[in-house]
Image (cartoon, rainbow, N blue to C red):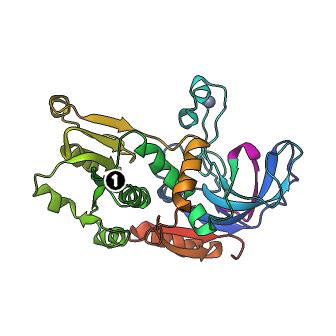
Amino acid sequence: MELFLEKPKEMKIREMEPLADPVGDEVKIRVIYGGICGSDVGVYLGKLKHAVYPLRPGHELVGTVIHAGPDASVEVGARVVILPNTFCGECSYCRNGDTNICERKKSLGVNMDGGFSQEFLISSKYVLPLPDDLPNEKAVLIEPFAVVVHAFKKVKITKETTVCIIGCGNEGMLAAALAHHLGARVTAVDINPHKLELVKQIGDIRAVLPEDLAHESRRFDVVIEAGGTSSSVENGIQLVRPGGSMVVIGLAPEAILPVAYVVRNELTLYGTIIYNFPSDYLQTIEYLRDPHFCVDAIVSSIMPFTSFQQAFENALTGNYGKIILSFNGV
Ligand SMILES: [Zn+2]
Ligand SMILES: [Zn+2]
């Protein structure tokens, strides 16, 4: 069985054609968990410009290898996480290790079929075995969390760094958790009070509405923009202290920037997209293995994939943390 979008807003569940045996370096994955991402919601609503329908959504995937082709690099029985963005390995960016900006990149669940299914085939180039001590509930966060781990490499965040996270969606929550884990002094901003309550559960994090910050003169060493709207970018840049940085993870189509303010205060603006593979995945796994790194507040629920309608409706409200679908009754 698989989830399937004939076109935006028409998601259904259907029987799949039996899968062929893996050939070459392919492996057959039995999916354990799939996380619902903001981009899955965007694909569902028809809001992602580069999405191609009909489409099977889903890219935050953990599963077990149940069949391996003769040239596969992983063995049957391995528990793995999926890299859902392809890379050619040959372009100048790939050769430099920057697989995230590969000229020929394609994205599972966006412009090629994703993994919201009980089983699927994929090249073993795009799977990474998991350490035994990493539970599935944490492993399913590797893909979205690697986005944050990669973004944090742009700046220096240590003890006492003041960090402001704008937008407490899944990426914002994970960014707040990582900044907190690194010992930073963290302020998180969201327009939704439900999200502020969730982010406070991570630890000692100040969680405020945008208007609360607007009344203060507080500035931050680092602003992480994960709201993805023009106003979150425009407000974010005002919150950077002279000499500080803003790292933009959100995908606001455009925003108006006060260039003279940026120049006069020597601000630095970083764009950052997904992660490099496998380096960022490996570092993300190390963070998640740390028992002190708590993700309980970030995962809201695990639901059977047959309840996808309810799961997507919940995700659409914007009131929840990460919602995970389970595909084989775990
Ligand atoms: Zn995602
Ligand atoms: Zn490439």
Where 269 falls versus 121 (above or below)?
Answer: above
Residue 272 is left or right of residue 203, and the answer is right
Q: Which residues are magenta?
A: 116-126
Which amino acid type is shown beneath numbered disc 1?
Gly
Q: Which residue is mark 1?
A: 227
Residue 43 is left or right of residue 258, and the answer is right
Ligand 2's image quarter is: top right
* Residue 261 placement (x, y as % from top left): 15, 34
Above or below residue 221? Residue 307 is below
- Assign a secondary structure to mark 1: loop
* Left or right side of 187 for 169: right
On the image, the x and y values in percent for residue 204 come to 30, 67
Q: Nearer the viewer, residue 91 or 78?
A: 78
Q: Is residue 4 visible?
A: yes
Mark 1, Cα crowd under 10 Å, few <14 / some 14-19 / many 20+, is many
User: Percent position (x, y) of residue 109?
Assistant: 61, 52
Which residue is painted at 33% across and 57% down in the image?
167
Q: Is residue 179 above or below residue 323?
A: above
The residue positioned 39% from the left and 39% from the top of the image is: 154
The answer to whether the beta carbon of the residue marked 1 is less than 8 Å from any atom of ligand 1 is no
> Relative to the observer, which residue lies in front, 205 or 300?
205
Report the front residue among 231 and 235: 235
Q: Residue at x 25, y 49 (%)?
A: 231
Most distant residue in the top direction: 92
Q: Residue at x 43, y 41 (%)?
A: 153
- Can you say which quadrant of the picture contains the N terminus? bottom right
Q: Quadrant of the C terminus?
A: bottom right
Query: Outermost residue toward the front?
Result: 159
